[in-house]
Amino acid sequence: MARHFLTLKDLSSSELVALIHRAIALKRDPTAPETAALLRLRTMVLIFEKSSTRTRISFEVACAHLGGSSVFLSPSDSQMSRGESVSDTARIVSSMADLIVMRTGEHSRVRTMAEHSAVPVINALSQDFHPCQLLADLQTFFEHRGDIRGACVAFLGDGSSNVCQSWVEAAAMMGFELRVGAPEGYHPHPDLLAAANKHCTIITQPQEAVIGADLVITDTWAGMGQEEEKVQRLAALSDFQVNESLMAMASQEALFMHCLPAYRGQEVSAEVLEGPQSVVWDEAENRLHAQKALIEMLMG
């Protein structure tokens, strides 16, 4: 039976830690002979219903490094754009390909893809979760500061975003404190908060959220599909910009992360994004290494 990766909870805590360490090892030795032919004569199909830069490049390069080939389908390239069901698409694609990577809107779509696929399905972003981003984020923290267990992490901005909701899952799995600094109406799903229990706290004052934090994270305030809400969102979230005065309230050794694309002057100031505490460029590159480790786990 195929194993899928739709949220972080598709891994155990020990598997997640092992995957992070494997990603770090693959980064050190990207041409390791034991992985160079893992996907030889195997094909990865990317079904992307939303635009992408880092996710698409990192998956296609990862597939090439592992000796495989990839096929990319944009929204207009598949019959789903003309009404073919996700379930039928899953049956057809998985009869020919060895791995499906899906980037979509409603999380139910990637769940349906997995339910009807004979091969592993990876969630490359859905409306509710972005687990591949979290693999890279956790790897980046481990590289710069060591184990994240016991650390204090602050996420500022839209707490209902897919990135933040995956951070909520990570907090419970990895045993760190997550403070979500977000205004009313922008909080993670209540079920996720209940599952995270004592590991996640909602704080409506940005300064209180970042005090003493070891890591400060933000994300764009108007993600894909939210363009019509942009004016409303900018007004609601304006007090949650990560700037130098806010970072000064975190730990002196605090790191700053952003999954990108970043909009300087909105969710983050240019000074923080380009500053010495920012590890966003390492974070972006680590998408490649973390996803190679993930593919190896699912396909190996």
Image (cartoon, helix red, strand yellow):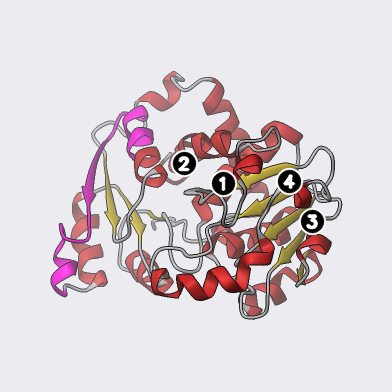
Q: Which residue is mark 2?
A: 291
Alpha carbon distance from label 1 to label 3: 22 Å
Mark 3 is surrounded, within 10 Å at the Cα level, by few (under 14), some (14 to 19) or many (20 or more) other residues, namely many
Q: Is residue 25 left or right of 70 when viewed as pictured?
A: right
Alpha carbon distance from label 1 to label 2: 8 Å
Residue 294 image offset from top left, x and y in percent: 48, 43
Alpha carbon distance from label 2 to label 4: 32 Å
Residue 195 image offset from top left, x and y in percent: 69, 73
Q: Is residue 99 left or right of 75 when viewed as pictured?
A: right
Residue at 86 percent of width and 51 percent of height: 212
Looking at the rendered structure, the kind of residue marked 4 is: Glu
Q: Earlier in the sequence, mark 1 or mark 3?
A: 1
Q: Which residue is mark 3?
A: 210
Mark 2 is surrounded, within 10 Å at the Cα level, by few (under 14), some (14 to 19) or many (20 or more) other residues, namely many
Relative to 16, is 172 above or below? below
Q: Say if mark 1 contacts mark 2, CB within 8 Å.
A: yes
Alpha carbon distance from label 3 to label 2: 29 Å
